[in-house]
Amino acid sequence: MLAKISFTQEPKEAIAYLQSKAKNYVPTFYYDEMMHEAHHRAFTVAKIAKTDLLKDIHQSLLKAQKNGLPFEQWKKNIKPTLQKKGWWGEVSVLDPKSGEIKDIYVGSRRLRTIFYTNMRVSYAVGRYNQQMSLKSAVFWRYSAIMDSKTRPKHKSMHGIVKHRDDPWWNKNYPPNGWGCRCKVQALTKKQMERKGFKETKAVLENIAEKDWSYHVGKTDNLSNMLKKKVESLPQEIKKVAMPTLKVSETITAIRIFMKSKTKNIHQEIGKIESIPAFLSDYTRDKQLEHHPELLEVEYGYIPIIIDAPDELFVRGKYKYYVKKIAGKKYMCIFKVVAGKNEIFLQSFRITKDKDIKREKAKKRDTR
């Protein structure tokens, strides 16, 4: 029988699937940064580096799914949040692979992709779970929408029937591409005979696009994806324990901040003894003026230096963090703001042993 899925009803399996991603918000730049099946265990939206914005979008999609909201209503609801957090219209984002700032446009087209991708995948998971629970309906029939928008390869598979254990489904259970509307019908042997369908014995080509060549809900490669992201970092940084992407996310934010022209804003760059450490726009501008030798990518090392310094010493209200990365020795100097429970970066520079020795020998600051 055909598993019934409706966008106007509350599908328990689909909602449970989308809800299950709530504990894993993973920033990515490219959709394929996550291993295929990892998308079933984590929520991501390409070009978003902030987990709080990922959470906002995820929760809005979940609400839309529970209430059966159409795309236009969902877009109307989420748009103010996107505007408030700077992810609407012309947006500058950092490509972590090249270190370049790229301009993208966030509007109806991008939101439509986000909405329908998440809805169709979650409904496909619900449909798959329903079909697997049907003991007798072990024959699956590929059903494409036979109109002018359907891809030729998807049309070519319309009507083929394979046993649900056939390995072909491992890479071709729909959706099989961006905007794919194909579905699968589950049929019993009697239904097959009555409708005149026959099982397809021929070996079929894979029709799924690169980003969609996996089976709904079968495996979890999230841990492998995290490992791959860490392995792509410089050798000195890989030595630092990174159980989550929090450090990577902070690095991305700092690198964007260094190229921005924002004023009257502080960028959090880590925590020192549980107290937030900030980089102000004033210090950023001063650094760019007095230390032009520092590359934008090098500012991304600051969270690593805070987390795992080679050397740490205190002089009055100043804290000094020193670490060697890629053959260079860096020094971060932080000032503790008394009574405000805040710490601000005062200076970041490439240093030498004699400079460190000189800083240590300075008279203790008592101002």
Image (cartoon, grey):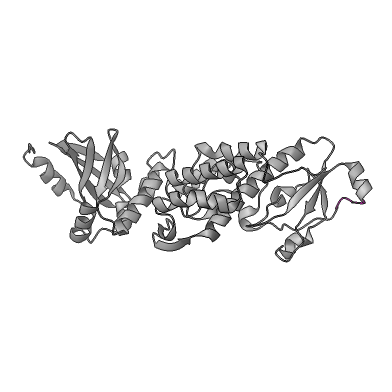
Assign the magenta stretch its main secondary structure.
loop
Q: Quadrant of the C terminus?
A: top left
Q: Is residue 125 left or right of residue 291?
A: right
Q: Which residue: 68% across, 52% down?
A: 175
Q: Which residue: 39% across, 61% down?
A: 101
Q: Quadrant of the N terminus?
A: top right
Q: Which residue is more in the foreground, 270 or 193?
A: 193
Magenta stretch containing residue 25, yes or no?
no
Q: Is residue 5 above or below residue 133?
A: below
Magenta stretch containing residue 199, yes or no?
yes
Q: Which residue: 65% across, 57% down?
A: 177
Q: Is residue 184 left or right of residue 263?
A: right
- Position of residue 283 measured from the top left corner of the image (x, y, whole percent): 21, 52
Can the viewer see residue 366 in this picture? yes
Q: Is residue 188 above or below residue 252?
A: above
Specify the farthest residue to the left: 363
- Position of residue 245 measured from the top left corner of the image (x, y, whole percent): 43, 43
Question: Could you say which quadrant of the image residue 93 lies in?
Answer: bottom left
- Position of residue 77 measured from the top left corner of the image (x, y, whole percent): 50, 48
Question: Could you say which quadrant of the image residue 292 lies in?
Answer: bottom left
Magenta segment: 196-200
